[in-house]
């Protein structure tokens, strides 16, 4: 026997080297093969170890009992205590008439229908064994998101770039955790996660709960969650094919082989999830993937996202300001052209910045949007400008900001826009009179140095709009009575 000693480093005190020492220690644990072992591509998989979390697998109760006895013996011989109270058993597949009695030593093992291992929650009583994983991760992401956003109550308004950084660092890890395994074949399962992302990004931009979804991504550079998760899956698959980690590669080979025989597997789910994207990304189910083919899939995924955002903005009647920017692009734009953080998000004045965001995302107080939200909805041709009240003057963005001849708006336009822009952009008035209204607005928005002035002008126009009641034209007859 050795003399009593005090540990100053290593496994007994939680030293940073402890994980390595523990791995060296636990590597002596091995299980004998059993006829009912789980086999992936010819490789027996009967034991998984993550730190001190042990997972044993078998396709029969006698097989799992043998493994439990072996682990119990290893612990007894190596001065370890196996906590049977915390040990759980899950039974996948059709339940037998009577559940097997599982024990370790003389203590019974608790049989449950849901358990978490390595951060992944599995359930045995639902068709999707990872359904509860989505639920738990949505709840965790929502809690973190609420905590991050509540920071404003202590420090004041947090600018969008900082809020988006917090999203990437704190919220998104929960939204994508385990996405390499939990493939998105169920819209209902993914919906709570998407809801957290949409709510957070709307709050980050200062938008309402009914604002359009596309600007949340075109203006921030954040990917829609379905695309983000798909990209991580493909990158993980490329890593497996390139570096060939033994267990992961065996799992992929097994999934691919089973899929060829018509079984639902990880590989078939991957193909299905990519085909279910708004712009489908086709994958050959019967062709073994390679690093090159997966790299092409990643490129196809980026093109799919770019096309999806481009067509969504193009086809939306509610995003004319964004379409003015996108219309200058080719019909097949790159992802960086349609999904990138915009310069105006860095404006330091909160209210003008939020006013500009609301203008570009059609979450503004102009009649073209107010009439759409009323119940019943006001037909577009009757959403007449509350200022000039002319028969053909629809209260659109360009009309209120640049065209309306009402004295109050003209005075504000001269003083707070044209005069203010003149020192920064000589010839402003000439451009204003020469260019179509939407082209003039788009020109200003492309010049970062002009954004503070324009944002302040938009904010002051909003303030003026709020002082004038919405002009409701109740019928076409009433519309015809208005001046031209």
Image (cartoon, rainbow, N blue to C red):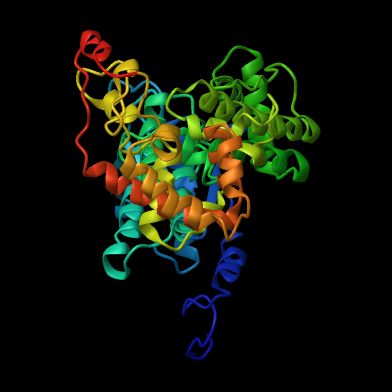
The residue positioned 58% from the left and 58% from the top of the image is: 449
Quadrant of the drawing holding the C terminus: top left
The residue lying toward the viewer, choosing from 454 and 55, is 454
5 lies above or below 180: below
Number of marks in the image? Answer: 0
Q: Is residue 101 left or right of residue 219?
A: left
Q: Is residue 261 left or right of residue 292?
A: left
Choose top left, top right, bottom left or bottom right for residue 295. Answer: top right
Report whether residue 74 is seen. yes
Q: Nearer the viewer, residue 282 or 255?
A: 282
Q: Residue at x 30, y 24 (%)?
A: 384
View extreme (top): residue: 477
Where does the image place residue 381, in percent across and percent down from the top left? 34, 16
In percent of width and height, residue 347 lies at: 48, 59
Q: Residue at x 21, y 23 (%)?
A: 472
Q: Residue at x 63, y 55 (%)?
A: 426
- Residue 469, placed above or below residue 153: above
Locate residue 294: give its quadrant.
Answer: top right
Quick check: 51 above or below 481? below
Please say whether residue 34 is visible from this viewpoint. Answer: no
Q: Nearer the viewer, residue 275 or 432?
A: 432
Residue nearest the observer in this picture, 79 or 473: 473
Residue 78 position, x and y percent, is 50, 67
Vertical placement of residue 399 versus 343, above or below: above
Tell me where residue 145 appears, x and y as whole percent: 35, 52
């Amino acid at each position: 026997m050795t003399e009593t000693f005090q540990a100053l480093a290593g496994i007994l005190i939680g030293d940073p080297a402890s994980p390595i020492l523990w791995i060296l220690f636990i590597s002596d644990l091995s299980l004998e093969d059993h006829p009912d072992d789980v086999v992936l591509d010819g490789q027996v998989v009967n034991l998984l170890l993550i730190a001190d979390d042990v997972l044993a697998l078998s396709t029969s109760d006698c097989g799992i009992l043998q493994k439990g006895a072996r682990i119990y013996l290893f612990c007894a011989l190596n001065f370890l205590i196996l906590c049977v109270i915390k040990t759980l058993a899950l039974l996948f597949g059709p339940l037998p008439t009577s559940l097997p009695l599982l024990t370790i030593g003389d203590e019974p093992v608790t049989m449950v229908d849901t358990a978490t291992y390595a951060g992944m929650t599995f359930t045995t009583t639902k068709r999707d064994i990872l359904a509860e994983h989505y639920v738990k991760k949505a709840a965790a992401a929502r809690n973190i998101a609420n905590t991050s956003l509540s920071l404003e109550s202590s420090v004041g308004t947090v600018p969008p770039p900082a809020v988006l950084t917090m999203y990437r660092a704190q919220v998104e890890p929960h939204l994508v955790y385990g996405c390499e395994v939990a493939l998105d074949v169920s819209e209902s399962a993914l919906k709570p996660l998407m809801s957290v992302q949409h709510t957070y990004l709307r709050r980050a931009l200062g938008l309402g709960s009914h604002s359009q979804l596309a600007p949340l991504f075109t203006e921030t550079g954040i990917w829609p969650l379905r695309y983000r998760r798909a990209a991580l899956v493909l990158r993980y698959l490329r890593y497996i094919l390139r570096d060939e980690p033994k267990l992961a590669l065996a799992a992929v080979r097994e999934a691919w082989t089973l899929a060829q025989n018509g079984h639902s597997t990880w590989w078939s789910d991957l193909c299905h999830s990519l085909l279910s994207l708004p712009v489908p990304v086709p994958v050959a189910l019967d062709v073994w993937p390679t690093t090159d083919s997966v790299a092409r899939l990643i490129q196809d995924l980026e093109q799919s996202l770019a096309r999806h955002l481009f067509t969504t903005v193009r086809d939306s009647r509610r995003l004319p300001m964004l379409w003015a920017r996108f219309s200058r692009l080719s019909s097949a734009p790159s992802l960086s052209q349609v999904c990138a953080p915009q310069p105006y998000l860095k404006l330091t004045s909160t209210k003008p910045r939020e006013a500009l965001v609301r203008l570009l995302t059609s979450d503004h107080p102009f009649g073209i949007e107010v009439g759409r939200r009323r119940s019943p909805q006001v037909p577009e041709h009757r959403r007449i400008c509350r200022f000039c009240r002319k028969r053909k003057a629809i209260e659109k963005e360009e009309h209120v900001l640049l065209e309306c001849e009402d004295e109050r708006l003209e005075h504000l336009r001269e003083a707070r826009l044209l005069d203010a822009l003149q020192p920064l952009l000589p010839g402003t008035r000439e451009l204003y009179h020469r260019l179509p209204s939407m082209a003039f607005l788009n020109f200003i928005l492309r010049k970062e140095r002009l954004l503070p002035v324009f944002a302040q002008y938009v904010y002051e126009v909003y303030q003026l709009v709020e002082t004038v009641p919405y002009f409701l034209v109740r019928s076409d007859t009433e519309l015809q009575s208005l001046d031209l």
